[in-house]
Image (spheres, rainbow, N blue to C red):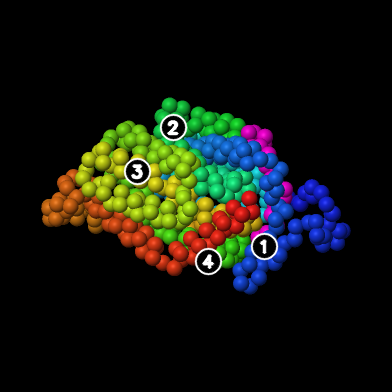
Amino acid sequence: MTEQEPEHTGGSKAPDDGRPTDAVAVTSAPSPDGAHLTDPGAVDTSLRSPRERSRTFAGILVNTALANITTSYLWFALTFWVYLETRNVIATGVIGGAYMLLIALSSISFGTFVDRYRKLTVMRFAAAFTLVMFVVSGAMFLLTPITSLLDLTQPWFWIFTVIILVGAVVENMRNIALSTTVTILIEPDRRANANGLVGMVQGLMFVVTSVLSGLSVGLLGMGGTIVVSLVLTALAYVHLLTLRMPEEVRAAATDAHGGFDFRGSLAAVLAISGLFALILFSTFNNFVGGVYMALMDPYGLEMFPVELWGTFFAVGATGFIVGGALIGKFGLGSNPLRSMLIAVVLMGFLGAVFTLREWAWLYVVGIWLYLVLVPVVEAAEQTVIQQVVPLNRQGRVFGFAMAFESAAAPITAFLIAPIAQVWIIPYARSAEGSAQLAPLLGEGTSRGIALVFLIAGIILVAAALLAFMTPVYRRVSASYAEKASQSSQES
């Protein structure tokens, strides 16, 4: 991937010594008080109508959806296959933990590249890299005996896993680039709607992969699954080559340096008053979400046979799609941050009550309603960032946020799972604990998990209500309103 040079569409050229003339956008150095770089000539939305730009965004969105589904499909399938063949939970735990850890570690680097290069260039690079990794994994699967590939004491298992892992992680670079294409292609007053569609795509990924990965491993085997993922990844890459985004005249001039600009990422976040607090709140929300990530499957498997649980969870995951579609239709209102906190309050309430009784319908409906609200939180954060952060820093801000938020849920999951297993669940199943919890949580084998969900939900509601009263909430809301007003006046 080579850095994009400015393409002059007219006017004077820069002189040979490299100094810009008045006809070329000038980059202003950041001032000590956090002033931003400016490069108004990098994006020209007058080249096409909003309708044409929306069609291009739809093409990018569909392409990203296919890529996300394909990588998740192969990654989930690998986890299922390894467990079914080895019955080793340590292997699957390491695989899942390594995936989230690498996303957290690489997101700032991904954001740096998104700021330095054209967005479609970044997407094509990520797609090509993932395709190469999957081809290598397929070749290794064909050439390595299955007994050696599944022997955890041999390097072949870990090499094979890391190849697929790296391919899946690099594909996430596209999601950061996708958020910046919303800024380039979509009118400011429609960005919340576009972000809702992004959430709908993520929900589709959950539904498809939770059902198809298991079926694929069972019916096609791991070899057939790799072939399917290769074909779909190649199709997505070819389709991506056909897309054009002329509005991005050149990569916006940026102060990003190297391949891992942590200092620049942090400076970009701190330059906007209250933005770091917004990211911290989203991270806290993910910390609590880690409780559900760790214990939702065990609770479901206590209630349903394993064959039915995957289907019921897929039904619940359709809430992602519905939530994203509702935002795509109605937006997030004049203050997305307020909508976000209201959604978090409702999520906390649902998380606290959907296991008050061990009723299957209550659990499934609760999951569905909870997941309807998740796209609201994610779309609100993206919409605020797209409005208040300059384009030439958005990649690093989104990458910084992804790094923090991706690390939060696994940390909580690793903490809460042993606490629940060693202390809370045994207490709830004891005669004394069962009798004490029955008036509040009813009776059943999973009252310990229900107690954890109840406490987590109460904490989440309290945190969101407190956030409403903070000066940070008022500052970020005012900054968003000011930027939105400026955008409407300019358009």
Given residues 226 and 64, the one toward you in this image is 64
Alpha carbons under labels 3 and 2: distance apart:
23 Å
Alpha carbons under labels 2 and 1: distance apart:
46 Å
Question: Looking at the image, which residue sits at the far right?
Answer: 16
Q: Is residue 167 left or right of residue 474?
A: right
Mark 2 or mark 4, earlier in chain = 2
Mark 3: which secondary structure? helix
Q: Is residue 89 left or right of residue 41?
A: left
- Secondary structure, magenta segment, majority class: loop
- Residue labelled with disc 4: 273
Let me know if residue 244 is in the magenta part. yes
Mark 4: which secondary structure? loop
Alpha carbons under labels 4 and 3: distance apart:
33 Å
Neighbours of disc 1 within 10 Å: few (<14), some (14-19), many (20+): many
What residue sits 19% from the left and 50% below the top?
A: 441
- Residue labelled with disc 3: 369
Mark 4 or mark 3, earlier in chain = 4
Counting from the top left corner in percent of width and height, residue 309 is at 32, 36
- Residue labelled with disc 2: 212
Residue range highlighted in magenta: 238-258
- Residue labelled with disc 1: 37
Alpha carbons under labels 3 and 1: distance apart:
42 Å
Counting from the top left corner in percent of width and height, residue 67 is at 55, 38
